[in-house]
Image (tube, rainbow, N blue to C red):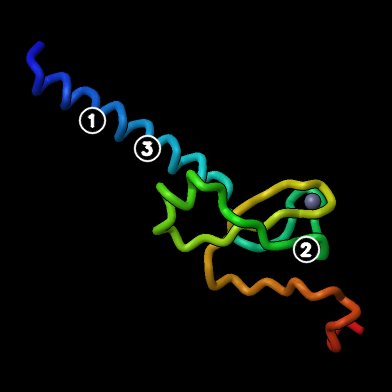
Amino acid sequence: MNLFTWVLLIAAVLALLYLVFLAFVYASIQAEASCQTCKTDVHLERASRPGMVKQYAGFLPLKRYRCRRCLKTFYVKRGTTVDLRPDSLDPEKA
Ligand SMILES: [Zn+2]
């Protein structure tokens, strides 16, 4: 194999790895911001995205949340309304 073939092969492998990485990020996107394990949104807090996600998938409009109860993290699409205030501060639920 000549050099061009090697470069093409390496580029194809890197592109495949990148697609697998994006698939993992995509798999942790949820439609609504509530913990699927605890079935509630009262324990949610914003979490920062891991450096690798920031660097390689930073263009995706995602916000990361962590459940303080079970420590599960997930992404929701930016623009999804999430109420992080405790219920006691919400006049509609009081
Ligand atoms: Zn949870």
What residue is rendered at 73% in x and 51% in y?
Answer: 36
> Gap between marks 3 and 1, in whole Å?
10 Å
State the residue in front, 3 or 37.
Answer: 3
Residue 56: % across, % down:
40, 47
Which residue shows up at 53% across the image and 68% down it? 78
Kindly identify which residue carries mark 1. 11
Amino acid type indicated by mark 2: Asp
- Within 10 Å of disc 1 (Cα), the crowding (few <14, some 14-19, many 20+) is few
Dot label at residue 30: none
| 16 relative to 73, above or below | above
Point out the image quarter for the N terminus.
top left
- The residue tagged with tag 2: helix, strand or loop? loop
The residue identified by callout 2 is 41
Residue, disc 3: 18
Of the residues under marks 3 and 1, which one precedes in the sequence? 1
Query: What amino acid does circle 3 point to?
Result: Tyr
Ligand 1 is within 8 Å of the C-beta of the residue at disc 2? no
Q: Comparing marks 1 and 2, which lies closer to the viewer?
A: 1
Q: Secondary structure at mark 1?
A: helix
